[in-house]
Every structure is written in structure tokens, then in C-alpha cells.
């Protein structure tokens, strides 16, 4: 149990966003001035002043370096290989989680509504950009475990202890359903190991399956866009 929680809590959620720069468009005003789409005016075509108002772009070339105790670079592990063309992963807001759990499990776990505060649910007619934390990740796993435990209870294929073959098939098919993509061999192996090895001390066979499936739902691929 402790090993499983540590495993779930160490999953990283990459946040933030970068957008591609767009060049301002120029328009010819009636008085002969060149006006950019951002509202800047340049007197005539031979104006030496550069156009203003170009949009910001993300860059890691000029990032500052900060050092802490022991002369340790505090930004050494910062993610810098995120493509500028798209956003980093964004945490799904609380308002969409009920639909996501229903899509995968067929129903909404009862504890989701009781844990709205853990997900910093926004008031009605407001939107707050959600932020990941250890609390939301741990709560997500508990809710997922509740849902997967109900799922395996009604399906006879989870009555037998997981084997190499059964764990491979179930982990692969469930991950594909949850993530809307094919899982990698390493991801399937991680799920199998959780079902077969790390939960071997659990006497309830269906609980072992539920732990493995819940770990898939507590991953960044399910909790983020």
C-alpha cells in the first residue's frame, strides 16, 4: 500500500504553455500612414521605427540561473524541450472530471463530489486554471481506486489472480481506453508489475486488479489535456 502511494505521488505533471509568435499585419490608412493590427502607426513607408506590439514568444536561451545552498543550480532540472508550437499538458478542471470517469468506468465514483475542494473547484460561472499538487494527485488515486474496485467487482475476468498473459491484455486494453492512445511496452510493464508483484501481499484478488487500473487513471495521460 505504501509503495503504491509513493509510486503514484511521484508521477510528474508538466505544466505551463508556450505559443507561436505571430507577425502583426499592416494596413494602409487614408492619410497614408501604415497601421499595424495592434494599433501602432508608422508615418509613411520609409519610417525607420520598427513595428511595435509583436506577441511574446517562449524562449529558454535567455533564462536566468539561480543557485541555492551548496552552489546548486536550482533550475538544472527545468523542462526546456517542450515544442513552441503547442501547449504543455494542462490539468483537467474539476468540472470535466465527472464526464471523464463516466467515459471510462460507466459511472461517477461517489467520493468525487465530496472532494471538490481538493481540486479547487471554481465557483459557478467562473473559471480558475487548475494546478496539480500532491493533494490532488493522491485524491485522484483514491477516487480512481473506488471506481475501479466497483468495476472489477462486476466482471468475472478479474476473479483470477493476475498472470503475465492476463495482466498484459488487461493493462493494455484499459490504458488504451483511458488514455485514448496505445500504451508503450514500458507503460504496460509498469502496470503488470503493479498487479503481479507490488500488490502480491494483497489477499483480495480484485483489489490487486483495482490498484493496477487505478494507477493508470491517476497518471498524467488521464488527468491532463
Image (cartoon, helix red, strand yellow):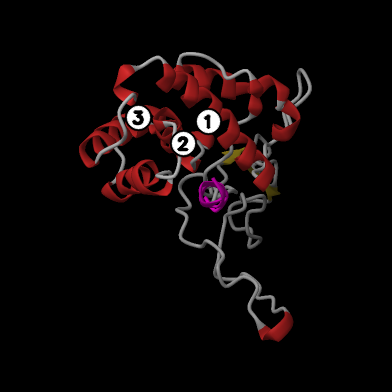
Residue 110 drawn in magenta: no
- Front residue of this view, candidates 176 and 36: 176
Q: Return the residue found at the far front.
A: 203
User: Which residue is the site of mark 2?
Assistant: 211
Q: Are marks 1 and 3 in contact (CB under 8 Å)?
A: no
Magenta highlight: main SS: helix
**Mark 2 surroundings within 10 Å by alpha-carbon count, few (fewer than 14), some (14 through 19), many (20 or more):** many
Q: Residue drawn at (64%, 23%), measured in percent from left and top?
A: 112
Q: Which residues are magenta?
A: 1-11
The first of marks 1 and 2 along the sequence is 1
The mark lying in front, picked from 3 and 2, is 2
The first of marks 1 and 3 along the sequence is 1
User: Which residue is the site of mark 3?
Assistant: 174
- Front residue of this view, candidates 114 and 70: 114
**Mark 3 surroundings within 10 Å by alpha-carbon count, few (fewer than 14), some (14 through 19), many (20 or more):** some
Is 14 on the left or on the right of 180, as rendered? right
What whole-number distance in Å separates the C-alpha atoms at marks 3 and 2?
13 Å
Q: Residue drawn at (68%, 38%), measured in percent from left and top?
A: 31
User: Which residue is the site of mark 1?
Assistant: 145
Q: Quadrant of the N terminus?
A: top right
Please provide percent x and percent y for residue 129: 68, 36
Q: Are marks 1 and 2 in contact (CB under 8 Å)?
A: yes
What whole-number distance in Å separates the C-alpha atoms at marks 1 and 2?
6 Å
Is 58 on the left or on the right of 30, as rendered? left
Q: Is residue 2 above or below residue 210?
A: below
Amino acid at each position: 500500500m505504501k509503495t503504491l502511494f509513493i509510486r503514484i505521488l511521484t508521477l510528474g505533471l508538466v505544466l505551463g504553455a508556450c505559443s507561436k509568435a505571430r507577425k502583426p499585419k499592416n494596413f494602409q490608412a487614408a492619410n497614408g500612414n501604415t497601421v499595424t493590427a495592434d494599433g501602432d502607426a508608422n508615418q509613411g513607408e520609409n519610417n525607420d521605427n520598427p513595428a511595435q506590439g509583436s506577441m511574446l514568444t517562449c524562449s529558454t536561451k535567455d533564462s536566468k540561473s539561480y543557485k541555492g545552498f551548496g552552489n546548486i543550480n536550482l533550475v538544472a532540472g527545468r523542462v526546456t524541450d517542450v515544442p513552441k508550437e503547442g501547449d504543455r499538458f494542462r490539468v483537467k478542471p474539476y468540472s470535466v472530471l465527472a464526464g471523464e470517469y463516466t467515459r471510462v468506468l460507466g459511472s461517477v465514483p461517489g467520493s468525487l463530489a465530496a472532494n471538490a475542494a481538493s481540486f479547487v473547484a471554481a465557483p459557478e460561472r467562473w473559471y480558475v486554471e487548475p494546478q496539480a499538487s500532491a493533494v490532488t494527485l493522491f485524491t485522484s488515486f483514491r477516487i480512481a481506486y473506488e471506481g475501479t474496485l466497483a468495476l472489477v467487482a462486476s466482471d468475472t475476468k478479474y476473479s483470477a489472480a493476475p498472470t503475465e498473459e492476463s495482466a498484459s491484455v488487461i493493462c493494455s486494453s484499459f490504458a488504451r481506453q483511458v488514455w485514448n492512445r496505445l500504451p508503450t511496452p514500458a507503460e504496460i510493464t509498469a502496470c503488470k508489475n503493479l498487479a503481479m508483484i507490488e500488490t502480491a501481499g494483497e489477499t483480495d484478488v480484485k483489489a490487486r486488479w483495482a490498484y493496477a487500473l487505478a494507477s493508470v487513471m491517476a497518471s498524467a495521460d488521464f488527468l491532463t489535456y
